[in-house]
Image: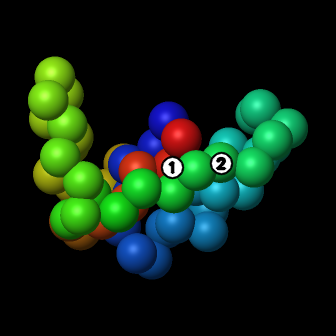
Amino acid sequence: MYVVCKDHVELAIDMFVDEFEDAPDIVDLKETEFSDWDPPVKCSQCDQAAVFLVV
């Protein structure tokens, strides 16, 4: 699972495919609410705001 900004979404997809050998689901964090989990506010690759969850 990767939480990334718009600039790093392609990198996160590539890392997911390399690790799991399957296509990930891409979740827009602005359109989705989680009842038991608060996603990180910053990208895991830089300091920009997190926009997507690659899972």
Binning the other alpha carbons within 10 Å of mark 1 as few (below 14), some (14 to 19) or many (20 upward) gives many
Q: Amino acid at mark 2?
A: Pro
On residue 54, the disc is 1
Q: Residue at x 40, y 75 (%)?
A: 6
x and y, in percent, of residue 1 in the image: 50, 36
Instruction: Report whether residue 13 is seen.
Output: yes
Residue type at mark 1? Val
- On screen, residue 23 versus residue 9, left or right, reads right
- Tell whether label 1 touches label 2 (CB within 8 Å): yes
Residue that lies at the very extreme toward the bottom in this rendered image:
7
Q: Nearer the viewer, residue 41 or 22?
A: 22
Bin the neighbour count of mark 2 within 10 Å (Cα to Cα): few under 14, some 14-19, many 20 and up.
Answer: some
Mark number displayed over residue 23: none
Q: Which residue occupies the foreground of this view, 3 or 34?
A: 34
Disc 2 or 1, which lies upstream in sequence?
2
Q: On screen, 7 above or below 39?
A: below
Callout 2 secondary element: loop
User: In terms of depth relative to the viewer, which is nearer, 32 or 8?
Assistant: 32
For the residues labelled 2 and 1, the Cα–Cα distance comes to 6 Å
Provide the secondary structure element on which disc 1 rests. strand
Report the residue marked by disc 2: 24
Q: Is residue 39 left or right of residue 11?
A: left
